[in-house]
């Protein structure tokens, strides 16, 4: 997208002083502060400015597009009794597949810009504050006046395994083709996109039609939503399904490593370059262009499995940006998933690249 002469002048000022205030820019260019704000908004929409501060587009970033919600999680103190009140514990934390991946990525050290929708309510404030605290750019998050922040409710058994979940993601209807088009420049300038299947069919169509040089990494979210990805499998660089989601995409019933390989072969035939197929506590299959590697789950004390998949996908994305080889990338992702399950929160508060590498070293030391 082209920029005006005035926008070019503002860009030059921002390059010289990224922390300059809008009023200082207005004084320097002899225009009003409100005019500066409008020009900066246009530069953000065109992708030349990626966030406050001001982060210029020359700084490479990952664009994460997907859901943001509050996680309400309940864990039973004993075996679940369906249809009855179960003693247990309850927790509230920031969540959403896209948002979780974005925060995990930032904690690992990647530069991230997040695009989603939250309400103008206390939970929306909490989600954005958590993102900013982790270093995630949220200047492109929409906050319509007439929408409530999305909520994800999960029920876990005494072992931390999820038995039931409900989600209200109606807010994402605002992240439509029109909203995406207004931010086309911001998306175009990111070399890598991370998408989740919470996005509507309209949004996914726009994104995959718009995709040019970007590598696209996709989280399948759930068996109910993964079918939306079927038309675009040949445009997906990396896909992270679980067993149920892989079955929807391939027709293969995945129960073990052997059946996982069959499903992954089908996905490669459909055009997916790289697959990370997870089987919970059994482990995962990591496959790149037909060369696969099975990895056992790391032995840890499981507290909550809710954020394991999001952490694993963030780790894969971070490894992709670092150009790590397949085995190191896969093991790094397994470490991220394992660490995530040891916290009651959806995102482990001490997640970092160093923490995961140390976990891998400790795991290797236990192997005779």
Image (cartoon, rainbow, N blue to C red):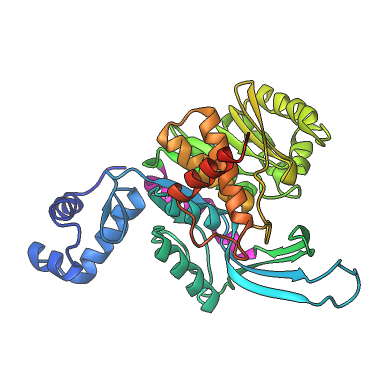
Say if residue 203 shows up in the picture. Answer: no
Instruction: State yes or no: residue 272 in magenta.
Output: no
Which residue appears at 58% of the width and 57% of the height?
Answer: 67
Say if residue 225 shows up in the picture. Answer: yes
- Residue 287 at x, y = what percent? 63, 28
Which residue appears at 54% of the width and 44% of the height?
Answer: 362
Image quarter where the C terminus lies is top right
Which residue appears at 39% of the width and 42% of the height?
Answer: 190
In the image, taking residue 139 as reference, residue 223 lies left or right, namely: right
Q: Quadrant of residue 212?
A: top left
- Seen from the viewer's position, the closer of residues 149 and 350 is 350
- Residue 207 at x, y = what percent? 52, 42
- Seen from the viewer's position, the closer of residues 85 and 4 is 85
In the image, taking residue 320 as reference, residue 289 lies left or right, namely: right
- Residue 277 at x, y = what percent? 68, 37
Q: Which residues are magenta?
A: 170-187
Residue furthest front as drawn: 368
Q: What kind of secondary structure does the magenta stretch mostly adopt?
A: helix
In the image, taking residue 89 as reference, residue 348 lies left or right, namely: left
- Seen from the viewer's position, the closer of residues 130 and 176 is 130
């Amino acid at each position: 997208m082209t920029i005006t002469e005035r926008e070019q002048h503002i860009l030059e000022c921002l390059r010289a002083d990224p922390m300059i205030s809008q009023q200082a820019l207005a004084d320097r260019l002899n225009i009003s502060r409100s005019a500066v704000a409008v020009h900066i908004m246009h530069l953000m929409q065109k992708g030349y400015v990626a966030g406050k501060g001001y982060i210029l587009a020359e700084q490479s970033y990952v664009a994460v597009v997907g859901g943001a919600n509050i996680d309400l999680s309940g864990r039973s103190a004993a075996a679940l009794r369906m249809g009855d009140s179960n003693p247990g514990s309850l927790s509230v934390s920031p969540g959403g597949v896209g948002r979780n991946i974005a925060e995990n990525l930032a904690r690992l050290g990647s530069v991230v810009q997040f695009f989603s929708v939250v309400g103008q309510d206390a939970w929306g404030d909490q989600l954005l504050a958590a993102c900013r605290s982790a270093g995630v750019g949220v200047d492109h998050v929409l906050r319509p006046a007439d929408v409530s922040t999305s909520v994800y409710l999960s029920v876990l058994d005494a072992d931390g395994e999820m038995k039931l979940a409900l989600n209200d993601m109606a807010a994402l209807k605002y992240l439509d083709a029109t909203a995406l088009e207004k931010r086309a420049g911001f998306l175009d300038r990111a070399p890598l996109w991370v998408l989740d299947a919470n996005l509507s069919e309209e949004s996914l169509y726009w994104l995959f039609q718009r995709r040019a040089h970007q590598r696209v990494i996709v989280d399948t979210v759930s068996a109910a939503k993964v079918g939306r990805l079927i038309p675009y499998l040949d445009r997906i660089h990396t896909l992270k399904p679980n067993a149920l989601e892989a079955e929807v995409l391939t027709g293969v019933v995945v129960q073990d490593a052997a059946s996982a390989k069959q499903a992954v072969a089908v996905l490669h035939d459909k055009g997916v370059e790289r697959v990370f197929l997870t089987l919970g506590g059994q482990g995962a299959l990591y496959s790149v262009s037909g060369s696969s590697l099975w990895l056992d789950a790391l032995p840890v004390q499981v507290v909550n499995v809710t954020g394991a998949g999001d952490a694993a996908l963030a780790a894969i994305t971070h490894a992709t940006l670092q150009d790590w080889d397949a085995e190191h990338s896969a093991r790094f992702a397994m470490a991220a998933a394992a660490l995530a399950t040891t916290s009651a929160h959806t995102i482990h508060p001490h997640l970092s690249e160093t923490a995961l590498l140390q976990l891998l070293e400790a795991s290797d030391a236990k192997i005779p």
